[in-house]
Image (cartoon, grey):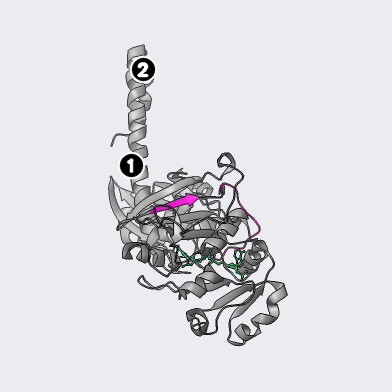
Amino acid sequence: MRAIGTARSALLLDSDAAFGVALQEARTVMSENAVADAQFMSRALEIAEYGAGHVAPNPKVGAVIVRDGLIVGEGWHATYGGAHAEIAALMVAGEAARGATVYVTLEPCNHHGKTAPCTDALIAAGVQRVVYAVADPHPVARGGAERLRAHGVAVTSEVLRDEACELNAPFLFATRTTSRPFVTLKLAVSIDGAVVDAHRARHWLTGPESRCEVHRMRSEADAIAVGINTVLVDDPALTVREVARPRVAPVRVVFDRQARLPTSSALAVSSKQVPVIVIVDPAHIGASATLAQLGIGVISASSLHDALFALRNRDVRHLLVEGGAGLASSFLSAGLLDRLVIFQAPVILGAGALAAFAAFSPQSAAVAPTLRVVSRAVFGQDLKTVYAVSHVDFGDEAPDVHRTR
Ligand SMILES: NC(=O)c1ccc[n+]([C@@H]2O[C@H](COP(=O)([O-])OP(=O)(O)OC[C@H]3O[C@@H](n4cnc5c(N)ncnc54)[C@H](OP(=O)(O)O)[C@@H]3O)[C@@H](O)[C@H]2O)c1
Ligand SMILES: [Zn+2]
């Protein structure tokens, strides 16, 4: 790759033609750099995912060290309270880090938390340039870029920023507000948008690949919620299986105004192994006494807002709602969804089937919510689409939350 400086000096040539060529060359050189930056950052985002389920409530972070166009070290934040991605990558690169470029998905930290500041380690290693995707949102840890620049390290920011925000959306959301968790609703639907057939019988719509992906999603949630009808019909376990166990098993939550959760349900009988919480209306709190005696947590809440506030106070930063249709519509109507994840299976359920949002009624198509597609992926025969429902701008700092990283 050529250096940008060469093209910049060519811009001084005194002829229109030469100027045009030089400008073109400058654009080409810059875009070559931008392409390389994006490629290496993309790799850093990919390896950041290895920390999924192991580092929350801290962010997933990946780092790639590049010298002369070659990767000489990679690392990621692998365990809660463990080495940060930059340090792990520096360990691999060793002396090769001197004069190298470091790609990291989050601005290097600048404070003594559970570990020493990464900025100090990068400066000591003699790196020439640091490229990061998204600024550290926390006022205590931020400022890494300024410190690096002050020590002569070139810094480029916001490379693949949107992707990096998506990677850590629940973490970034939690740094902005403590009033509720980040909420993801996941549903499996037919081609005609239904969640269950006319007989309401338990039946898998999606294939094994999708179901495995759902377990992966569960492993990144602090809690998994369903409505009481889903429990009464499906008797789900709502545990993480088929993938590596997360550091902390997600709590199981049932939205159950009248405390109807059967004591013989899979959730109730396993509540000693993995906690279960029922969200009960204050008017029915008496009915929850038997559940409480079994060790099941009871939250008294008269609205979804109150329930989410109570869950956030119990350290639920990322809530995965898994249906059914009634609960899904309530979350959508209340404007309490951040991401909607739809697994569409190649099946038609037809007349009498329960539509995913049957209980949601916008006044007209003109005012119906239009969602932004975040990503699409194929799992076996199914299509997984992630939609952004709320728009959260992660640009500003949020001083109301304490950092644990
Ligand atoms: N394909 C899929 O992805 C999928 C996922 C899940 C379920 N399902 C299927 O969907 C069916 C169940 O769906 P469903 O719509 O009948 O029931 P649901 O959404 O599972 O449960 C609805 C019930 O939850 C309780 N609830 C408590 N708080 C609520 C709130 N804020 N908003 C709405 N409900 C609240 C209500 O009962 P109380 O008033 O008594 O509390 C309500 O009747 C089952 O057949 C299941 O197999 C499919
Ligand atoms: Zn750090």
Part of the protein shown in magenta: 384-405
Q: Is mark 2 within 8 Å of ligand 2?
A: no
Res 140 visible: no
Relative image position of residue 153 (x, y in whole percent): 44, 46
Q: Main secondary structure of the magenta part?
A: loop
Identify the image quadrant of residue 245.
bottom left
Tell me if label 2 and label 1 are in contact, CB under 8 Å: no
Identify the image quadrant of residue 60.
bottom left
- Residue assigned mark 2: 19
Comparing 181 with 197, the one in front is 197
Q: Is mark 1 within 8 Å of ligand 2?
A: no
Relative image position of residue 134 (x, y in whole percent): 49, 49
Is 25 magenta? The answer is: no
- Residue assigned mark 1: 36
Tell me which residue sits at (29%, 58%) in the image: 380
Residue 105: assigned label: none
Q: Could you tell me which quadrant the N terminus lies in? A: top left
